[in-house]
Image: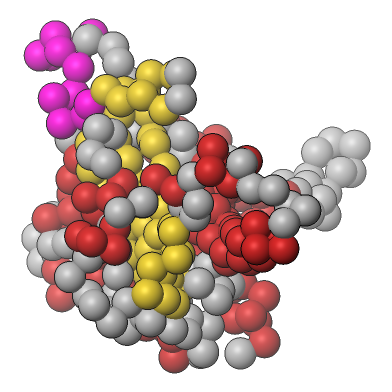
Amino acid sequence: MTQLGLGLDLSTKRTRKREFLDEMMRVVPWARLIALIEPHYPAGKTGRPPFPIATMLQIHFMQQWFGLSDPAMEEALYDVPLYRDFAGLDGGMTRLPDESTILRFRHLLETHGLAAQMFTLVNEILSEKGLMLKTGSAVDATLISAPSSTKNGSGKRDPEMHQTKKGNQSYFGMKAHVGVDAESGLVHTVIGTAANVHDINAAEALLHGQEADVYADAGYQGIEKRCKANSVRWHVAMKPGRRRQLDLSDQLDAIYDEIERLKAGIRAKVEHPFRVLKRQFGYTKTRYRGLMKNTVQITTLFALGNLWMARKALHKA
């Protein structure tokens, strides 16, 4: 690491970003993810040799964690030694990946459906280590805004995104529907839809089929009649208006209120992945046009989010 003229060693400061990257370097199953990508990666028999898969995957993940576009990622590799170090590019490399190389790698993952396969692989590893029990699930959805600007080639907003209303506020964009393990809060299923798709319409597809109990908020009222999985017990929250009418001095109403508290405590697990997505990774707005590309991105982010949430347990396992 370069030292400044005053003798300041820049490698001594453990910044939050460095700590984060070191942590993810330890918990991401790099070897198994690389093996998944390798059959689809160009051999590079002609022209310049391709960059190692590990390097490109590490760059791709940094894009997801820090919300960088392809050109911004290229510039960051030149500007930020920490990023080069994480991607293994400081060891005598004569060139750095440009934005086209970064774009081609992302397209390769999209073309072969590798984001979903990586998500599945991560969850298999977590299950192998006993971190995902699959006896119960909680389901929920979060809105993700999309750019409403029409300053693009078509002169229109993204046709696959839609307008919806939550409370008194309008949103334009998509929804990320997730099913999480009720015990650990780890995401086992991800579905991306337009924002105007009602949560209840995606609910059954969020089940993995092994759970006996499913927890959901009041927006899923009536799901019991729609769900074809008769072996599943749905625990849907009481409507807020109905709960406010409970008389807590009445013994029966007090029991109902306590049941709602217990259900809410389990259901809260589904909020943890959303917090990691939007606060830890800063993903609050779609980057691409179309549901497919954005669903691929959130699938990757939830896979990485699972590793982040399980990091302490993975160190012990």
Q: Is residue 21 above or below residue 7?
A: below
Magenta includes 44? Answer: no
In the picture, which quadrant includes the C terminus?
Answer: bottom right
- Residue at 41 percent across and 28 percent down: it is 166
Question: What's the magenta bit mostly, secondary-structure-wise?
Answer: loop
Which residue is more in the foreground, 258 or 292? Answer: 258
x, y percent for residue 154 = 10, 14
Residue 163 horizontal side relative to residue 153, left or right: right
Residue 111 horizontal side relative to residue 279, left or right: left
Which residue is more in the foreground, 132 or 199? Answer: 199
Residue 236 occupies quadrant:
bottom left
x, y percent for residue 315 = 65, 82
x, y percent for residue 217 = 46, 52
Which portion, as a residue range, is magenta?
151-162
x, y percent for residue 222 = 30, 54
- Residue at 20 percent across and 17 percent down: it is 157
Magenta includes 153? Answer: yes
Which residue is more in the foreground, 89 or 146? Answer: 146
- Residue at 18 percent across and 45 percent down: it is 292
Residue 175 occupies quadrant:
top left
